[in-house]
Image (cartoon, rainbow, N blue to C red):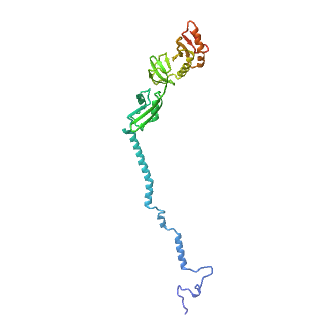
Amino acid sequence: MPKRRVSGAVPAAKRPTGAEPGRQAFAPGRTARLRSHGADLLDDPRDELAPIDEEPADDLDERLAAGVLPRLLYLLLTLAVVAGGYYLLTSPVFRIQHVRVVGAHFLPPDAVVQAAQVEGQSALAVTSQTTTDSVLALAVPEKANIIYQLPDTAVISIVEKQPAYIWKVDPNLYLVADDGTVLATTTSQTLPTIVDLDHQPIAVGQKLDPTIYPEARAILRVLPQIISPAPTYLLHSRDQGLIVPTSVIPQVVIGDGENLDAKLTVLRPVLQAALAARPVPQYVDLRVPTHPYFR
């Protein structure tokens, strides 16, 4: 009776005795290594839940503090400056209570104070340029400056224009600068004088025709060479201009400054001719030097 093989058993003749050509034998250790390497290549799902480069809480607080604190300090400093400025501008401690005027000889100091309009204002709010412009508008000062002596005093310094001649509107005498500005009244007649025949009233600070005095000065300079005794004053009217009074001929009309040199050149021969005439004329006109006449 033939022997039967047990199920699952491999015949000895067919059992592998070695590796077949081109094939590798099964190695359990190799499979384990492959499994381990594959696991390393796969992403771990837990990696998506893990935070990347997470900063510590203490570092975050420091960065927030570094950004907020400077802004807060700047805001507080700004508010302090605004509050301080408002206090200085409104505080009665810095309001001008006293005003001193230096250099006023012709102008009354009260007139300068009134023009400056600084009394009662804050010394920190008053503009120096505006103040000096208001003082210069009085016309008599040539320069003006203001300084503040804290807490409550203003000092206004002025340099007034200098008088060059006297303008007489009977019976008043006025000191006048060479630019025609009326500076003040006077009682002394020590400067060259021009008498206004029109008797037009004038006031301090008013400005007369600035061309009158240069013409009068040139005439008064040459009169001692032509007339003896030479007059120390001239007459003026708006219609006739400058007039030379003499002891014999009451009016020698020169007119304005046009062709002044020519007028002064013919003044001597015309006066000699007039004095030789009979009767002696009372009026000589030199306004047109090429055609002078007398009557």
Residue at left 52%, top 74%? 36
Above or below 281: residue 114? below
**Res. 217 visible in picture:** yes
Using residue 219 as the reference point, say whether residue 63 is left or right of it: left
Which residue occupies the extreme right position in the image?
21
Residue 290: percent from left, percent from top: 62, 14
Residue 268: percent from left, percent from top: 59, 14
For the N terminus, give its image quadrant.
Answer: bottom right
Using residue 221 as the reference point, say whether residue 104 is left or right of it: left
Which residue occupies the extreme top position in the image?
278
Which residue occupies the extreme left position in the image?
92
Between 258 and 271, the one nearer to me in the picture: 271
Using residue 109 as the reference point, say whether residue 39 is left or right of it: right
Between 48 and 248, the one nearer to me in the picture: 248
Residue at left 44%, top 57%? 62
Between 240 and 38, the one nearer to me in the picture: 240
For the C terminus, give its image quadrant.
Answer: top right
Residue at left 42%, top 47%? 77
Above or below 283: residue 173? below
Residue 156: percent from left, percent from top: 43, 33
Residue 219: percent from left, percent from top: 55, 19
- Dividing the picture into quadrants, the one containing residue 147 is top left
